Image (cartoon, rainbow, N blue to C red):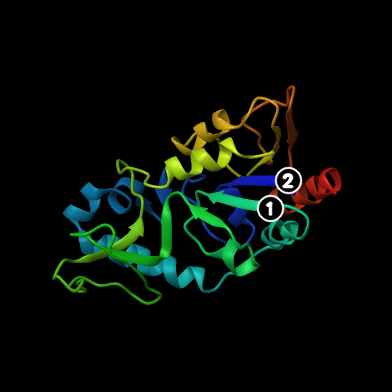
Amino acid sequence: MKHIVVLTGAGMSAESGVKTFRDHNGLWEGHDVMRVASPEGFRQNPELVLDFYNQRRKQLKTVQPNQAHKDLANLEQDFKVTIITQNVDDLHERAGSSDVVHLHGELLKIRSTGNPSDIKTWTEDLNLGDNCDKGYQLRPHIVWFGEDVPMIETAVKICYAADILVIIGTSMQVYPAAGLINYVQPDTAIFYIDPKPAIQGRGNITVIAKSATEGMKDLIDKLI
């Protein structure tokens, strides 16, 4: 069974109504991203940051997986599929995908500021004064700007073993995630789905200049 590795970005979830800051001049829901998505921002105004993610968590509950999420999950009937996502939502899992690696953390999890490995599922509001068992403030389990990406080495190994690489809805400008394309084997077939593709089709790269839902239809026609 061939192993398909899928790299997904904000464009994957945009059609479900999940908002992204990259289309709005660096503003995310009216906030400078560095104020709400950096360790410095959290130190300066933790209440603002916690409230920001509380709002994101509430919004996530109002959206559903789109057809592209469902189509990726259905590919597991014919292929081994591993999804490496830059998204912090749980839409891949809700659509039925069984093997998902979150590079940038998960919105529905929190962790201790004193122990990064103390991670818990959290679906409600997180407030100042919500502490772990050892008394440290809890924070969103999100990789903020300037922080290490703990799952990147795992992602590199997965890409190295891919028979087919599919890239969906990402600008290919956010590192280290954008560099994962360099770790597949030279003869690996690559499909890039994005309405405004940042790379050109060449050799083993097939560009599908469409949205995630429309592009997945084309991909399925090519694969099956």
- Give residue 80's mark: 1
Amino acid type of the residue that numbered disc 1 sits on in the rendered structure: Lys
| Residue 25 visible in the current orientation | no
Of the pair 78 and 130, the residue shown nearer to us: 78
Query: Residue at (78%, 45%) from the top-left corner?
Result: 219
**Is there a contact, CB below 8 Å, between mark 1 and mark 2?**
yes
Residue lying furthest top in this view?
203
Query: Residue at (52%, 45%) from the top-left corner?
Result: 23
Q: Residue 42 in the image: x percent, y percent? A: 23, 55
Q: Earlier in the sequence, mark 1 or mark 2?
A: 2
Q: Dot 2 lies on which element? A: loop
Instruction: Give the vertical position of 118 relative to 127 (above or below).
Output: above
Residue lying furthest bottom in this view?
124
Instruction: Give the vertical position of 23 relative to 101 (above or below).
Output: above
Query: Residue at (37%, 77%) from the top-left corner?
Result: 124
| Residue 68 visible in the current orientation | yes
Count neighbours of disc 2 (C-alpha within 10 A) and say few if under 14, some if 14 to 19, many if 20 or more. Answer: few
Q: Residue 118 in the image: x percent, y percent? A: 27, 64
Tally the marks. Answer: 2
Name the residue tied to disc 2. 2
